[in-house]
Amino acid sequence: MRVALADDSVLLREGMARLLAEAGFEVVSQAGDGDELLEQMEELRPDVAIVDIRMPPEPHGGLGAAREIRSRFPGVGVLVLSQYARPSYAFELLRDSAERTGYLLKDRVSDLHELVDAVRRVGEGGCVLDPVIVSQLVRRPRQGRDALDDLSEREREVLSLMAEGRSNHAIAERLVITDRTVEKHVNGIFEKLNLPPSPEDHRRVLAVLAYLRM
Amino acid sequence: MVCITRWAGLVAGLAAFAFGSALSSVILAEKPGSFSLPDLLRLLGAWSFIGSGLVAYRRRPTNRTGPLMVLVGLTFLLTGLAGTEQPIVRTVVALVQPIHLAAFTHALLAFPTGRLDSRFARWVVVGLYLDLGILYHLPLLLGDDRIRVSFSDAASAAGAAILFLAAGALLAQRWRAGSRAWRRGVALVLWPGALTLAAMAVFNASQVVPFSAGPAPTWIFRIAFVAMPFAFLAVLLRSHLARASVAELVVALDESRPSGALRDALARTLGDPSLAVAYWLPDEGRYVDIDGRTVEIPEAGGGLAVTTVEREGRRVAAIIHDETLSDEPELIRAAGAAAALALDNERLQAELRARLDELSASRARIVRAADRERRRIERNLHDGTQQRLTSIAMALGLAESQLRSDPEAAGQNLRQAKTALAAALAELRELSQGIHPGIVTERGIGPALEDLTYGSSLPVTVSCKLDGRPPEPIEAAAYYVVAEALANVAKHAHASSASVTLTRESGRLVVGVRDDGIGGADPDRGTGLRGLADRVQALGGSMTVESPRGQGTILRAVIPCA
């Protein structure tokens, strides 16, 4: 898988390039700001661009570049790395589509396995949302009667994993249950929250997020 | 204080009345058959002084003319007992009765304020008291030496003549110096007074220089003593005088004045030395003195009264004065109206000073808050992140040395280092968030407030209705206001939910944070809200907190935002 890197910190960029190379990715370019990244995009057409959310040009730097890539190069996956867990950034990024898109806390680079998993999922067309953001959304206090209270403990776990962008199969592996059971839970959740069923994982993410944002 | 003097005054007045009545009955009893016209005039004159004096004192307690008139009446009454056969009474009467002439002159010269306003006048009055109180009685001590006695008599009479003449001259001089309004006010007393003084001077002169003055001076004196008290009273109670002094106030206001002179001029005009002026600050809803310090307006009663001064329908100032002045509302109102413009000008000065005080206080608070914040950051960096990084360095060093000898243990240490690093990163993230929430700058106030609600421990709804982004300092201030307010709600309000509204109303950004908690929040307590108010005020805005007990809290910040 071909990867382009953009971060204004050379130290971090180099370190990440080494990590990704170690994990078997081909790092095709490194950029220090959003404009440079977009230029490289034109000729290199990587599978995934990993973009630091806070970098020049100010003020929209990384987020602006990410949205630009989403609209101009729909085939390229974009994984945004952020120092802070900001739901509003994630919503901005996922405004139109969750396909080939990810939002991850920068801390995750310390866990090679998680980073590699995220890059791969985005590169394969999926959606990745950092668990910290998802837990903020799920735990957020709500006014009045909350349909989330009707979910069982297991269903809440499944809901969180769905919001992180994971497939049924991945959820089953994570919770050590069968795919069938996951499917049953998913149907139960959609029914209780009164959500329209969405077959694709990335559409499902948007539906769940829209619910959680309310 | 005022109460005590009032009671003392009442008691003294009653005593004077009782004493006068007793004297009168003695006089009437002494002369059952031979009651002459002069005797009747004396009784009438004495009582018109006592009565008018008591009325004057009752209506103008701060004016000494009333007590002086009572003194004149009582001493004058004593002259009726001069022919008594009881030796002790006769001696006392003889000693005290001449005083009535000195007291009469005193009252005239001190008119209408009851105070002698020049050193010369004081000398004349003291001279008369000495002459009539002591020199007059010298013959009693001198015994039978005829030459000495007649010389002493002559000296006393001559002195009295000169002093009466001087007093008359003083009256004439004051007439000339007085304004037209003042002259109109006091004419009724001054002219007859001067005539009486002249008659007394002539009478005394006729005792020294051998010429006959005839009965005229004596009759002038007798009639004057009956009529003058009413003139005194009439003038004292008439508002001409008040208008005259208000006219003088207007003249005084015309001149350039140092600060505080306005209060002095008002105090003079209203005859209340303890008078105080408080200036109204409409924006802050409080009164301040000329130096901008807060003034508490006294409650009604307690000897003080308050008259509000308005100019063009706006409250400008309050005059805090003696309660007795409330008998003359027109006078105070006239003085207030005359001084309204000057008071309004001084009000602006006072407002400026109050603002400067507030400004330096808020500057000091901002500096202190910045220092406190730096200390907090330093402590967090030192206690948390630095310690953690040190432990990571140690774990890595250990792992390096174990790499060959014990790869298992080295891996263990590396994992520990990684866990500690994750924690250090989390701490740093939290710390830098606290220093400045970058999201406000990057994404604007709306998304920043939305993110605040995700971290809140209670349901918060945000309604942000802005077209376009306000300038950065205003966005930051609004963000801090909401963040601090929500933190307070979570900590103290016991609320079940909160709502945040942001609107732009006629060039102002209005931030509202409302909760349904227990209320009773005190904006002056704690540094958090105070610091926010300073931040908002630094942008020319204002912040209010409404927190009735049991009815939740509404915090509202209004920031100019063109």
Image (cartoon, rainbow, N blue to C red):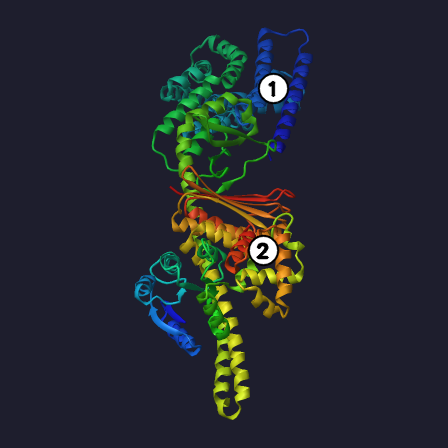
- Left or right, residue B516 beside residue B280: right
Please say if B344 is above or below B553.
Answer: above
Marks 1 and 2, Cα distance to the nearest angstrom? Answer: 98 Å
The residue lying at 58 percent from left, 51 percent from top is: A195
Q: Who is closer to the viewer here, B283 or B195?
A: B283
Judging from the image, mark 1 belongs to the subunit labelled B
Q: Which residue is mark 2?
A: A140
Q: Residues within 10 Å of mark 1 (few under 14, many from 20)?
A: many
Q: Quadrant of the N terminus of chain B?
A: top right
Give the amino acid type for the residue marked by disc 1 in the picture. Leu
Residue nearest the viewer, comparing B200 with B139? B200
Please provide percent x and percent y for residue A88: 48, 55
Above-or-below relation of B180 to A51: above
- Give the numbered dot on residue B78: 1
Q: Which secondary structure lies at badge 1?
A: helix
Residue B387 visible in the snapshot: no
Which amino acid type is shown beneath numbered disc 2?
Arg
**Does label 2 lie on the same chain as label 1?**
no
Residue A76 visible in the shown view: yes
